[in-house]
Image: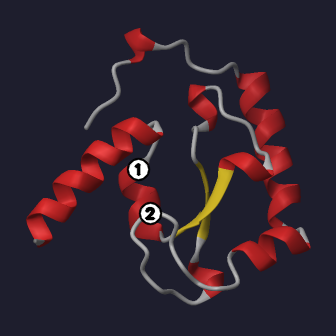
Amino acid sequence: MDIDESYFTPASEEHLAREKQKARELSRSQWWKNRRGDGRCYYCGGRFPPRELTMDHVVPLVRGGVSSRSNVVPCCKECNSQKRDLLPVEWGEYLEWLRGRKG
């Protein structure tokens, strides 16, 4: 699923740099360590060693998302790679398709 950038204005370089710095700070917080501590991927529900979970922005930074507690979730590397810069509704369509393949 490719993203058609004609539907949105990509975030500025300044926004990306600022939010990536905030994400680095958030990833070192006790809150984040606790959040990924149960080892569950937010999207697929799979279990992983907590250190293997990545921080995913539900609304991606390039789509105007921010690095805040309300916009980041623990995510396995496979889901993070597949989700890329998709919005939740776009990613939901992919997950439904994936569930249909496994069912």
Number of numbered callouts drawn: 2
Which residue in the structure is indicated by mark 1?
83
Which residue is pictured at 44% across the width and 63% down the height?
A: 43
Residue type at mark 2?
Tyr
Q: Position of residue 2 (x, y in %)?
A: 29, 32
- Across and down, in percent, residue 66 comes to 73, 37
The three-letter code of the residue at mark 1 reads: Lys
Query: Residue at coordinates 45% horizontally, 41% vertically from top-left?
Result: 88
Image location of residue 31, percent across then percent down = 85, 69
Point out the frontmost of discs 1 and 2.
2
Residue 7 badge: none
On screen, residue 32 versus residue 38, left or right, reads right
The quadrant of the picture occupied by the C terminus is bottom left
Mark 1 and mark 2 residues within 8 Å of each other at the beta carbon:
yes
The image quadrant that residue 16 belongs to is: top right
Disc 2 element: loop
Occupied quadrant, residue 36: bottom right
Which badge, 1 or 2, is on the more N-terminal residue? Answer: 2
Cα separation between marks 1 and 2: 10 Å
The one of 39 and 80 positioned closer to us in this rendering: 39
Query: Is 25 located above or below residue 36 in the figure?
Result: above
**Of helix, strand and loop, which one carries label 1?**
helix
Q: Nearer the viewer, residue 100 or 5?
A: 100
Looking at the image, residue 75 lies above or below residue 9: below
Q: Which mark is residue 43?
A: 2
In the image shown, does 71 or 63 lie closer to the viewer? 71
